[in-house]
Image (cartoon, rainbow, N blue to C red):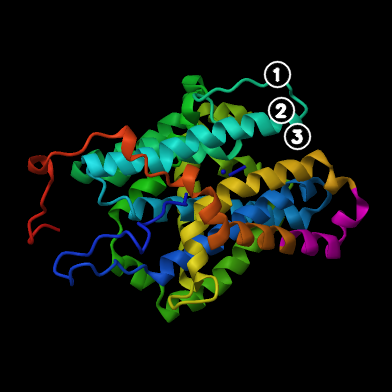
Amino acid sequence: MSDTAQPVRPARPTTATAAPGSAPGRPKQRDAFFDNAKYLAIVLVAMGHAWEPLRSGSRTVTALYTLVYAFHMPAFIIVSGYFSRSFDASPAKIKRLVTGVVVPYVVFETAYTYFTRWSDGVPDRAISLLDPLYLTWFLAALFIWRLTTPIWRVVRWPLPIALTIAALATLSPSIGHDLDLQRTLQFLPYFVLGLCLRPEHFSLVRRWRVRLLAVPVFAGAAVFSYWAVPRMDYAWFFHRDAADHFGVPAWYGPPMTLALFACSLVLVTCFLSWVPGRSMWFTTLGAGTLYGYLLHGFVVQAGNHVDWAGHRWAHTPLGEIAVTLVAGAVVTALCTAPVRRLFRCVMEPRMEWAFRKTPPDTVRVPSQGHR
């Protein structure tokens, strides 16, 4: 998530509904902090994918790869959960789920299948909507997480329950690959945590004391990652396999679930503490992170096909820096407005023809006192 949601998008400013009590017709304001966080996270996702072919030749690259994978998808998923708090399975929200998640999943699952027939040299690869290919796992997981949101909003201990489910998943290698349920269940606590968060929690994270403390914490994490390269399998952070896949007793799964969750949560806190809260040159790109996430995979697959990592220059320090910068530039370009306009027909289709009109008497009107 190789991996990471969100890239969940709040409603576009031109179509967002006004908040209760606001002036009629006034568009809902986007929060620069979250757009900045999503953009910076998607850049890290692209860089992580660019580092994959370089891991075997560099302990430093592998350490950075491990460090980034410890928090970039958890950060995406926590933000996705935060923006899913209002999901109530109403007709309007179900329509949005279908057009914004299900349709892109079907389109990109099919597109990736055809593209990787060429890039991977597998001409007979079958299209399977039940077995997410490459980056599409996140859309399948997001669909399931969103549908279960009403449950997490009413149970008394949502996060402990989600952690228990994730821990039990590590004990169950028989779950299989349908809809990538193993990864969906193991990443579930991050989504549920996002559902539980409130604006004041993000304000606490962005205090200057937290920002200062994040410096030695991140530095320590980087040193530990370098030390752990020959001693630990970084694939634990992918959350896509049961414990026995790593050649350890099954009972390792639950404690590793808790340890990884704590580690990722600390690093996500550090990451978010450094995210600017004001509007930056890249803030508007935060609205297009799902585009960047899904589209940059084609660039990565094409690069692997031509074996760019087979050139010696790519494994030099300057080459590794160049690859990192190119990855960031590519995903940045894919988040821009022209690209979003070009692909909006498959990423955010309106599809009015596919849905029944909701009768006026079934429209929910929230009470003014409801929170």
Write the start and end of the magenta stretch as one range.
311-324
Q: In the figure, 190 relative to 168: above or below?
A: below
The reply to whether discs 2 and 3 touch (Cβ–Cβ < 8 Å) is yes
| Quadrant placement of the N terminus | top right
The reply to whether discs 3 and 1 touch (Cβ–Cβ < 8 Å) is no
The reply to whether discs 2 and 1 touch (Cβ–Cβ < 8 Å) is yes
From the image, tell me which residue sits under label 1. Answer: 124
Identity of the residue furthest to the front in this view: 353
Q: Residue visible at 78% across and 54% down?
A: 59
Q: Secondary structure at mark 2?
A: helix
Locate residue 19 relative to residue 262 in the image: left or right.
Answer: left
Amino acid type at image mark 3: Ser
Q: In the figure, 104 relative to 129: above or below?
A: below
From the image, tell me which residue sits under label 3. Answer: 119
Of pointers 2 and 1, the one earlier in the residue sequence: 2
Q: Is residue 255 visible?
A: no
Q: Picture coordinates of residue 140 (x, y %)?
A: 45, 35
The dot on residue 117 is 2
Q: Is residue 138 magenta?
A: no
